[in-house]
Image (cartoon, grey):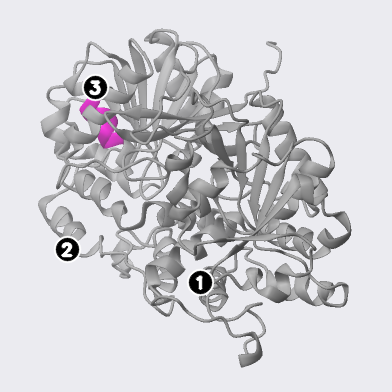
Amino acid sequence: MAPHREISTHRAYALVNGRRVHYRRWGSGPAILALHGSPQSSRCMEAIGRRLATAGFCVIAPDTPGNGLSSPLTVTDATTADFAEALLELADELQLGRFGVYGFHTGATIACALAARHPERVSALACDGLPDWSDAERQLLLEGYLPRFEPNWDGSHLCWLWARVEEQTVFFPWHMAKPEYRMHYDVSPMPHLHGNALDFLESGDNYRMPYHAAFTFKAGDWLSALTTPHLFAAMELDPLAAHLQRPGFNGVATRAFSTPEAMHLAFISLFNEQPGDPAPAPIYPRADAFGLSRGWVGEDRRALAWVGNLTTASVQRPLVLLHGAGGSQRSFSDCLAELTKQRPAIAVELPGHGDSDRRQDDAPSSVAAIGREIALACQRLGLTEYDVAGLHLGGQVAAWLVNEGHAVTGASLGLSAVDAAERDDWASNYAPSLEPEFDGAQLVRAFRIARWERLFYPWFKRNRSYLVELSSDLQPADVHRRAVELLRAGPCWQGAVTAEAEFDLISQSPPPAKFKLFAVDGDPRSTAAQMGRLQYPVARLSEQSSHWAKPLAALGYPLK
């Protein structure tokens, strides 16, 4: 028996004709591109990716355009052919020669089109659930399956979203709750539904484009041009299994399977008989039009996401930026490109936040635990000396990094300092559970919290003594973006809020010669009462983060 091989996940970005493409990669050997269904992401390819990798292949699973963390196509009314060509461009960017292709549902249409258009590049094609729509089915899907997804002020769009991902496991099409459309699946477990909801939230209204392309796909047109070795299959309970007997598949071998393992073994056999070229080593991501690169650093399932530029010619030390609890690098997105013109700088996302890998079972709940992970990430990125600036909780972590000798100097943007008498109340009320619930209440809860955060501080004390003045209109899209940040952090947000409440910044603050305090206009954690807790000089920052580049570029100079 062959020895067991631990298969780890490598996550990366590729820049393809100006579009950012996120992908996951498992294993080594002949290359296979694996394409997810809609409205999901490469997250859903992990099981088959690891299975194929264990069999000796290198599996590369991109988020298809407009899904997950990949930019959408700029083509209006993109077709399956457009998605196939975009996939080929990714293969070229990753320097793949010949490769196998696997696709599930929507991904199967793209895989089939790519193999039909470019047989010289595709060694073998495996499709799990390729559709062959009738004209009536196509019309039904195009008329009702793809409503616009836009934030509403009250969060009701998230109620719709949860019902939508639930119904998709009960009826197909999901919007036709009639006996003839009832499927015989178990309703997916709540964590699975929650994962699909988060994938949908990443896509936003872009979810409609890949679906539209798949619904206008005509199997017969593509299969008649197919010369690549192939296997068209489906699970017996899949509503698309019946499509394998339709006219578009005339003369094409098809198979239905009762278990996923049996299907996977058949695909492995196909790819073994017709292997592609060995996949080259992963390629370091190129910088985008703003001079920024993106990536992950750390262990499998515990990697931290980062964005920035460490290669600038400036002689200044690199600057590491840390966001607050429940946030993401988006806190610095408006200033980072300008900042990196003046000094090397990266924004690192806290454990389980933003694009950092989720850690459902061991979310760090102390500033020291978070700080140790940030310090290790900086070490792995080759940063021997650096300055650090953080927003709120990020400022506490910055103070810890300076005190522990990891960073040379630091700064806090706003001040998180909770009185000892309030800490229990704060930790239990500020971050209620966002764990999946049967009715999707966690989605609306995140939206309501995101809205109240703009109106009161702390948000759970909703009386005029804690009122926060609005400096601009309360836009549903802004509240929605913050709600998505909270949902992505999930239990790690709770751990971060606990860490924030329990850290005694007043007694553990670095000496003023190594630490700077910024008050951000309009920030409830930057009031005179808050900032006066530390006996530091206070510099002011504009509420507009686009204005932060110049003062952050000077951090550490002349501080020593």
First-in-chain label (1 vs 3): 3
Q: Which residues are magenta?
A: 108-115
Q: Position of residue 454 (x, y in %)?
A: 53, 75
Q: Nearer the viewer, residue 436 or 425?
A: 425
Q: Is disc 1 in contact with disc 2, using a CB cutoff of under 8 Å?
A: no
Q: Nearer the viewer, mark 1 or mark 3?
A: 1
Residue type at mark 1: give it: Phe
Q: Is 551 on the left or on the right of 337, as rendered?
A: right
Alpha carbon separation for disc pair 1 and 3: 43 Å
Residue type at mark 2: give it: Glu
Q: Is disc 1 in contact with disc 3, using a CB cutoff of under 8 Å?
A: no
- Within the magenta stretch, is there residue 336? no
Q: Quadrant of residue 301?
A: top right
Location of mark 3 (residue): 115
Location of mark 1 (residue): 447
Which residue is depicted at the point 45% across and 54% down? Answer: 547
Q: Position of residue 242 (x, y in %)?
A: 28, 44
Q: Nearer the viewer, residue 497 or 337?
A: 337
First-in-chain label (1 vs 2): 2
Q: Is disc 3 placed on a helix, strand or loop?
A: helix
